[in-house]
Amino acid sequence: MAVSIDHGRAVDWGRTSQDYAQYRPGPPEALYARLRALGIGLPGQRVLDLATGTGVVARALAGAGAVVTGIDIAPEQIEQARRLALAEGLQVRFEVAAAESPPFPPHSFDAATANQCVPYFDKPRMLAALRRLLVPGGRLVTSQFSWLPKVDAIAAASEALVLKFNPSWTAAGFDGSISPMPRWVPPDIVLEGFFWFDADIPFTRDTWLGRIRASRGVGASMPPEQVAAFDAEHAELLARIAPEAFTIRHRVDARILRFP
């Protein structure tokens, strides 16, 4: 199933699931350590991971002992998530479902997580679903894991090339600004916790090629022949400006929202 976010240009994560599974790193362990300190992702806690993708967050939480269910609208993403969980020896339930209509009984979960996916949701419908699914006082964690093109020259150059091929892409130019309380949150949902930190994530030219190819602006929205042309030009660009191994500065942020 496709969604639309970039000026009407269709985005379908299923088209880039193999690259996504291989090249898109999840947030660093420091995110999960901070969340555990705030009561999220504890052993035995029942967690619903919305728009789980290939299950990067779901698998990390399950590895720490949480009882995790991940849902995504893209069957290809769920297929990769199941494969990766099996390879890691993790027990995670993955289902094809939308964040706005999870097919589970009331009060099935203690907490929900949503990493790098909230802009894709119909937020009132998503919140209505969570009011039903979470236990009273249940919590939603929204988080982002974003490179910083304003401080990282390699990320900025890669973004400029994406925009050359796909001017409709709206994710470029993140300046690091973060709002503790999103505007879409209604007044009865309380901000219980908020934090952010920066992390230098290691890449090689090859893995950064794959990471950008597996992004919304490239693999999830360009036709295959355009992806191939972009990838070739991106490889030439990196050969000129990047060493074989490097790091990309990312900003990680999370907020914990408590339901009434």
Image (spheres, grey):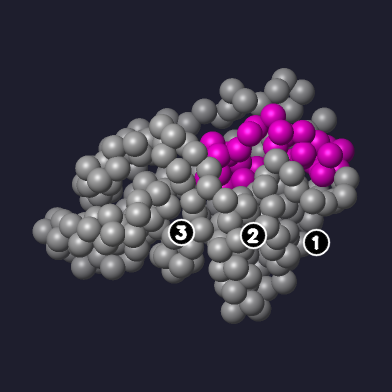
Q: Compared to 39, does 59 lie above or below?
A: below
Q: How far apart are the two marked residues, 3 and 2, measured between alpha carbons?
A: 21 Å
Residue 129, quarter of picture: top right
Residue receiving disc 1:
44
Q: Amino acid at mark 3?
A: Arg
Q: Determine the residue positioned at 46% across, 67% down.
A: 18
Disc number for residue 214:
none
What's drawn in magenta, residue-wise? 114-143
Label 2 vs 1, first from the N-terminus: 1
Residue receiving disc 3:
15
Other residues around mark 1 within 10 Å, as few (<14) / some (14–19) / many (≥20):
few
> How far across and down, in percent of the image, does residue 62 sit?
68, 65
> How far across and down, in percent of the image, does residue 38 sit?
69, 46
The quarter of the rendered structure image containing the C terminus is top right
The residue tagged with tag 3: helix, strand or loop? helix
Q: Compared to 211, does 118 lie above or below?
A: above
Residue receiving disc 2:
58
